[in-house]
Image (cartoon, helix red, strand yellow):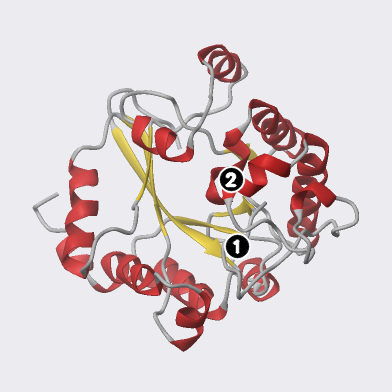
Amino acid sequence: MSIEIGKRYLIIHADDGGLCRSVNLAIVKSLEDGIVSSCSLMAPAPQFENMAAYFTNNSQYDVGIHLTLTCEYPHFPWGPVAGKEKVPSLVNSNGHFWYSVEEFIAHASPEDVATELQAQIEKCLQSGLKPSHLDSHMGTVFMDLRFIEIYVQLGMQYQITPMLVKPTEHSSDIIERFDFDVEKEAVDKLMKMGIPFLNLLYMTDNSTESLQAREEEYLKVVKNLPAGVSQIIIHPGYDDDELKSIMENSQSREYDFSVFVNNLVCFNSKRI
């Protein structure tokens, strides 16, 4: 698709494919019946294989690799694809990924990050997936310029576009939230190499307490999109017993799912 200067383009992206059955089913429904236009899968997650099998048989959908270096669910842990012995700085005493981004930053070595990210890409390719892009779970690869370089280099090596965001006034909120430390010189260098950048990346902070509030939140974002390519990251899921057992904010995923699937009349209304 060619991009016309001055026009606005929006990618609605479903995150965390492979996390669990409730999330997988909601992502598939969002793609099939909603206005979600892409998604990404986590190779280390427990239900990755089921999701990968679906997409190898449904290649019409835009699927990326959600490179994963943490697991924020203490009662639903997972560990590295490469094996804990090969990437010791990425795991806790139980052999699982660190629960928080802060723990990851405190321990992770660039060598182990490179080993694990490559193992995840290889697993996805061996499963039959044809990924369109790379992105990062919890923004971990954007926490250190050394990790960003690994991320971009792997994208170039495998010819898979790495998702990157321009550090502008439009994206400053998400950059601040993830504590991105992207220097202008590094951005200029990457852009000269022809690597595309998003003009805006938006993800809810889960503070909305009702479906109506979540809908209004997204409507406001869409109304104020800058020129260029923007992306809204959503986390669809069915708020069932499985999802409730994994996370405390399971209802937030039901809100995302409902806004972009069940409430399409409202979302596509003239209020946008």
Which of 126/94 is in front? 94
Question: Cα distance, mark 2 to mark 1?
Answer: 36 Å
Query: Can residue 133 be spotted in the picture?
Result: no
Q: Residue furthest bottom?
A: 241
Please state, as top left, top right, bottom left or bottom right, where the N terminus lies in the image. Answer: top left
Q: Which residue is mark 1?
A: 59
Tell me where residue 26 appears, x and y as whole percent: 44, 74
Mark 1 secondary-structure assignment: loop
Q: Is residue 30 above or below residue 168?
A: below
Amino acid type, mark 2: Glu
Q: Looking at the rendering, which quadrant does residue 53 occupy? A: bottom right
Q: Residue at x 48, y 34 (%)?
A: 179
Tell me where residue 207 appears, x and y as whole percent: 28, 58
Query: Can residue 271 be spotted in the picture?
Result: yes
Amino acid type, mark 1: Ser
Task: Name the N-terminal-most of marks 2 and 1.
Answer: 1
Q: Residue at x 78, y 49 (%)?
A: 116
Q: Is residue 203 above or below residue 93?
A: above
Q: Is residue 87 above or below residue 172?
A: below
Q: Residue at x 43, y 32 (%)?
A: 2
Which disc number belongs to residue 102? 2
Give the left or right position of residue 268, taking residue 251 as reference: left
Which of 166/56 is in front? 166
Give the left or right position of residue 135, taking residue 174 as reference: right
Which disc number belongs to residue 88? none
Tell me where residue 78 appears, x and y as whole percent: 70, 67
Local packing at callout 1 (Cα closer than 10 Å; few below 14, some 14-19, many 20+) is few
Local packing at callout 2 (Cα closer than 10 Å; few below 14, some 14-19, many 20+) is few
Tell me where residue 28 appears, x and y as whole percent: 48, 72
Which of 184/49 is in front? 184
Q: How many marks can you see?
A: 2
Q: Residue at x 81, y 43 (%)?
A: 112
